[in-house]
Amino acid sequence: MIMMRRLLLALSLLCLPWITMVHAQTAAPDYDEWNKVVIRATEAIETGRASDAAMDVLRGQLEIWRDTFADASTDYSISTQTLRAQLETLGPEPESGEPEAIALQRAELKLKLSEASTPTVRAELAQSAAAELIAGVDKLRRDRHTEALMERGPLPVNPLYWGDALSTLTKSMNHVVSEVRVAWVYVRHREDFGNNIPRAVLFLLIGVVLISRGRAWTRMLEDRVRQFRTPGIRGFIIFTLSLGTVFLPLLGVYAFTESIYATNLAGLRGDQILSILPLASFLLLMSAWIGNRIFPVNEDDQQILFLPAGKRMEGRADSSLIGLAMAVNVLMTEIARFDSWSPEARSVLFFPIIVFSSFLMLRLSSLLLSHLRAINTEEGKKVYYSRAVFVSARLFQFGAIAAIVLGALGFSSAAEQLVFPAIATVQLLAFLLLLHQTLTGVVLKLMGEGLEARDKSLWPVAIAFVLVMLAIPAILLIWGVRSQEVADLYRQIGSGLRVGDVKISPREILLFFFIFGVGYALTRLLQSTMKNTVLPKTKLDVGGQNAVVSGIGYVGVFVAALLAINNTGIDLGSIALVASALSVGIGFGLQTIVSNFVSGIILLVERPIAEGDWIEVGGQMGYVRDISVRSTRIETFDRTDVIVPNSDLVAGTVTNYTRGNTVGRVIVPVGVAYGTDPRKVEAILLKVAKAHPMVLGIPSPYVVFQGFGASSLDFEIRAILRDVNWVLSVRSEMNYEIARLFAEEGIEIPFPQQDLWLRNPESLQPAARVEPVNLDQEIALDQQRQTASQPPKATPDNDGEGGVER
């Protein structure tokens, strides 16, 4: 023990100079300068008088200081961790005392640790202060943005403002023209004017050609690619080439702006317009491209929306007009900012753009709803993106109506911040849908699955998840979140979320899945090697081989998960504590599951049954097809699956007909009529049994005279079969042969007969049939009988005619 302490002391002495060197090389932040920044930032936040641009500059400085303090605290923490590790190496201080050298070393390490911890704590406090100041700047900017949205300006429908608004727009245009005239007067007298003309003309020609012919060139290439036979790759190439309708004209716009810059005719206002012109052109071109892809011209192109040709043409036109409205809005916003338009002019001039864009949004929403009605009325046209189409249609409708109402009431800023982000969001969703279908086709083709497997494969889900994750920053930016806040959000996500002593970050999550994936892949590789190469060469039966392969799989997955958790910095001790706490709940609430799990392990180890065995358990008979840790799957003879819990197989009674070998016995009962020679029957039955090829000769089959039945003499054939799985077929074939030989020998197979004696058969004679009585007929008959029984009345002439004889 003393030698060990001396060795640790020597190692500590060797490490002390290195620790001192680390402290010397770590440059401490300038806290005096930081205090000045804190005072300036606090004053700016409290007063709120600084402009947005100044606040952005201040936020950038605070971010630099925050990162500086974070790096400093990390450097210091490494030093303190080293010192703590050496103190832990020395072990706890004994109560009875320790050698003087070790005590001195312990005291020196404690002093060093105290000195190293002070800069760390100071850097962490400064980092926290910087984070709070950044949050204050962000809150101030959000409050200003909210106030701007809620601020009500002049009513654009008031005719009193229309004349001033029109004159403001005219003045802005005249200013641009005046700048060009003044610049022309000045530029044409410069010496380098002639030298710049060829450059300007060249850029102008390039711009005109790209703007006028770029789309036609792209469509020509698309028509050639359509002849390819591979659907997935063809779709990807067409999708990529179709972007040329956006970027070729956009390059032409850049060339056009460069040609104007080469002439030096652009003044201050012209420079602002030219700087924003590529963005406006991109909005117009991209909107038209999305319209052409969502509402294609050709019927053969992939249909995103199921609409007739007329409605598709309407959709393309509306989409292009929306792009035009967005481009005009961007240009007018820049002009209004540069010329400082009055609130009245802004409200009046931007309201028609809002109304026009809202009208187009309503038209497009009606087309989207027409698509939904089409797929709902026709079977087989259900598509996975129907929910996205429905959300887009409702977003268009809500945004359009709300924007018109807000704009008319004077909330111009709120109307602009509602209508154009809504348009941009729907366009982004449309682009993601197009990109998703294209990438899905490529991936499915590369994986050899084909486009028909789109609805059954998981690749479309994975691609959609990745695209949505990538689109989240764009959606945040569209709806007004500043780029600094988005970057800060992702920085926080990248640095990780601390839960107790565990830090969860994307890096840790990726590391976990990587290690677990590698471990799982190695486990599967080992299972495949053992199953196909090693185990077939051993004396283990098939059931034992399957048990070994399953055991390797369970152990491999457990070890892979353990290594992945350990390498991501998660304390296994904490997991052990949680597991021990959950053990009580598992003991009561999950008792059945744990019992089945343990029973599954027992089945894999002891192997009383194996896959392929013919067993009977709980009244169910069939073949064992799969043994898992919780249950066993049995396939019955009528091809139905019965799931039996493993605990029933371990604790209950199981009959295994094929365990170890397939030899089994068949019993064929036979009955003959009384009066038949039993020995003759015995000989015939033995002949049938011995003649069957499935019956073993040793032990030889025999016939049992079971007894005297109610209607027959009962015999049984008992024979051992080579494969008991054929017992039904063997019994059937023996019965056929017995029936044939009995017919030849005249042996009768009896059936139950009974004699019936009747004690009083006369009582079973049917009674006389009683006819139903008709009351009217009975009365008429009685009257007839009474009339016939009376004598005739006397007449004067005694002739019965009632006349008088003359």
Image (cartoon, helix red, strand yellow):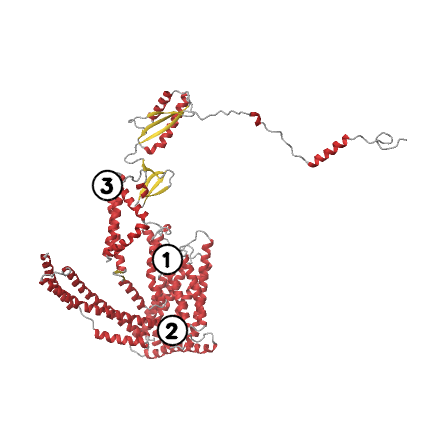
Q: Secondary structure at mark 3?
A: helix
Label at residue 535: 3
Residue that numbered label 1 is attached to: 222
Residue type at mark 2? Glu
Please tell me which of labels 1 and 2 falls first in the chain: 2
Against 171, residue 612 (above or below) is: above
The local crowd at label 2, few if under 14, some if 14 to 19, many if 20 or more residues have their Cα within 10 Å, is few
Q: Is residue 267 among the parts visible in the rendering? A: no
Instruction: Give the spatial CA distance, label 1 vs label 3.
Output: 57 Å
The local crowd at label 1, few if under 14, some if 14 to 19, many if 20 or more residues have their Cα within 10 Å, is some
Against 143, residue 220 (above or below) is: above
The spot of residue 420 in percent (x, y) is: 40, 67
Left or right of residue 23, residue 231 in this image: right
Residue type at mark 1? Glu
Please tell me which of labels 3 and 2 falls first in the chain: 2
> On the image, which quarter does residue 687 sit in?
top left
Residue type at mark 3? Leu
Which image quarter holds the N terminus?
bottom left
Against 104, residue 765 (above or below) is: above
* Residue sitting nearer the eye, 750 or 56: 750
Instruction: Give the spatial CA distance, label 3 vs label 2.
Output: 75 Å
